[in-house]
Amino acid sequence: MGDDPDKTRNHLENKDLNNNIELRTWYGRGFFWLLVTELVVLNGFFLARGLGCLHFNSVDFNVYVGGTLLQTFGVILVIARGLFKA
């Protein structure tokens, strides 16, 4: 009964804000490492194809590269719209 309702509300708002920041940080790091992994794999395919270790016809390779780039842009869009709302 001795607690001030405004003080309790401010404490809960601060706790909610801190949890929100932690969650956004966790998602941001996860998406970052997902993008890094995708781009490393894509560069590995470029290198393997350039060295002649992998043989794809150009249509298959272009579809793979286009799909990877679209997925990368999609993840960036999710980050920009979902984690960093105005």
Image (cartoon, rainbow, N blue to C red):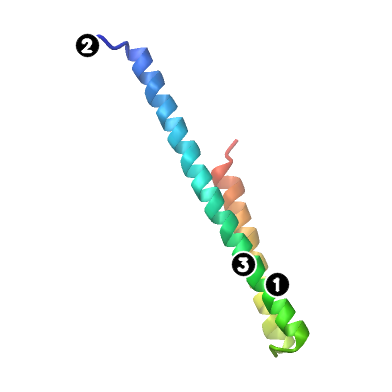
Name the amino acid type tagged 1.
Asn
Question: Which residue is label 2 attached to?
Answer: 1
In the rendered structure, the answer to whether residue 1 lies left or right of residue 6 reads left
Question: Which of labels 2 and 1 is toward the front?
Answer: 1
Mark 2 and mark 3: span between their CA atoms? 55 Å
For the N terminus, give its image quadrant: top left
| Residue 31 in which image quadrant | bottom right
Instruction: Please give the label number shown on residue 43.
Output: 1
- Which sits earlier in the primary sequence, circle 1 or circle 3? 3
Residue 13 position (above or below residue 54): above
Q: Residue furthest left?
A: 1
Residue placed at 39% from the left, 22% from the top? 11
Q: Where 59 sits versus 10, above or below?
A: below
Q: Where is residue 58 in the image (x, y as percent from the top left)?
A: 74, 85
Q: Is residue 5 above or below residue 39?
A: above
Q: Mark 3 points at which residue?
A: 38
What is the three-letter code of the residue carrying label 3? Glu
Measured in 3D between alpha carbons, the distance from the residue under mark 1 to the one under mark 3, in whole angstroms, is: 9 Å
Residue at the spot x=70%, y=90% of the render?
55
In which quadrant of the rendered view does residue 15 lie? top left
Q: Judge the density around disc 2: few (<14), some (14-19), many (≥20) Cα neighbours within 10 Å.
A: few
Residue at image x 53%, y 44%? Answer: 25
Residue 85 location (% of width, % of height): 57, 39
Q: How crowded is mark 3: few (under 14 residues within 10 Å), some or many (20 or more)?
A: some
Q: Quick one: SS at disc 1?
A: helix
